[in-house]
Every structure is written in C-alpha cells, then in structure tokens.
Amino acid sequence: MSLTLSEEDRSILTRLEEDMWREVTRFDQAFQEQRFAADFFEFGRSGRVYTRDQIIHLDSQPIHAVLPLPNLAIRLLDKNTAQVTYNSQVEYEVRGWLLCEEN
C-alpha cells in the first residue's frame, strides 16, 4: 500500500508545527490545550521530560526560531498518522546575551 500526503495536508501540518515556534501561539494556552493530547510529553534538548501541563503553562518569552523549519520532512506512517521531523534553530536571550542553539 502506497501512502501519499496531499499538498493541503502537508501545508496544514507545516503551519501547525511552525506555530509551535511562534510566540503568539506558543504561549496561547487555549491554542495549546486544543493541540496536545491528554498524555502528551516532550523531551527537552537536555533530555529532561516535560509534561503537557508544564509545556502549556510556560512563561512567555521571546522566541527567535528559524522559520521555515530547516530540513522539515513529513511522512505518513499509516493513513491517519504523520511523522514530522526537522532541525530546530533557536536563539535565546540570556542576561543580555543572544545564544544560538542548533539541533
């Protein structure tokens, strides 16, 4: 069985993923509540595990992410499941310094 992702679905998934890197949506609790599953968790860059509640209730801060997301790839795992991968490139402000982190 060959699985093909439509351009419309690819566009929707790209926009949803990039919205996680935009301040206006990343720190919008209603937006996040609608998108994360009840059992959602995330591994941070340090390996720390964050719960859904911790992610949704993050303090707002500037995000300087590279958009469009570098090396974005979307593949269908089955007819109802897509895997989205990319390299995140984000700059963080730390006590007046701007640090660049690339994964």
Image: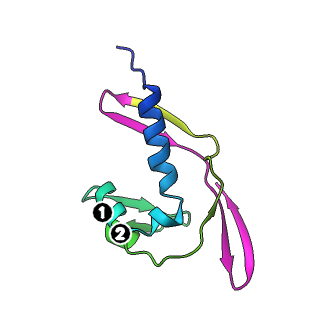
Residue positioned most to the left: 38
Q: Position of residue 15 (x, y in %)?
A: 48, 46
Q: Is the Cβ of the residue at disc 1 closer than 8 Å to that at disc 2?
A: yes
Q: Main secondary structure of the magenta part?
A: strand
Residue at x 36%, y 62% (from the top left corner): 32
Name the residue type under label 2. Answer: Gln
- The residue labelled by disc 1 is 33
Judging depth in this view, the residue of 102 and 27 nearest the camera is 27
Q: CA distance from mark 1 to mark 2?
A: 6 Å
- Compared across the picture, whether 44 is left or right of 28 comes to right
- The residue labelled by disc 2 is 29
Q: Position of residue 13 (x, y in %)?
A: 44, 41
Name the residue type under label 1. Answer: Glu
Residue range in magenta is: 77-103
Q: Position of residue 4 (x, y in %)?
A: 42, 21
- Does 51 sit above or below residue 80? below
Q: Residues within 10 Å of mark 2 (few under 14, many from 20)?
A: some
Q: What is the secondary structure assignment of the residue under circle 2? A: helix
Residue 4 among those drawn in magenta? no
Judging depth in this view, the residue of 2 and 24 nearest the camera is 24
Q: What is the secondary structure assignment of the residue under circle 1? A: helix
Quadrant in the picture for residue 92: bottom right
Residue positioned most to the right: 97
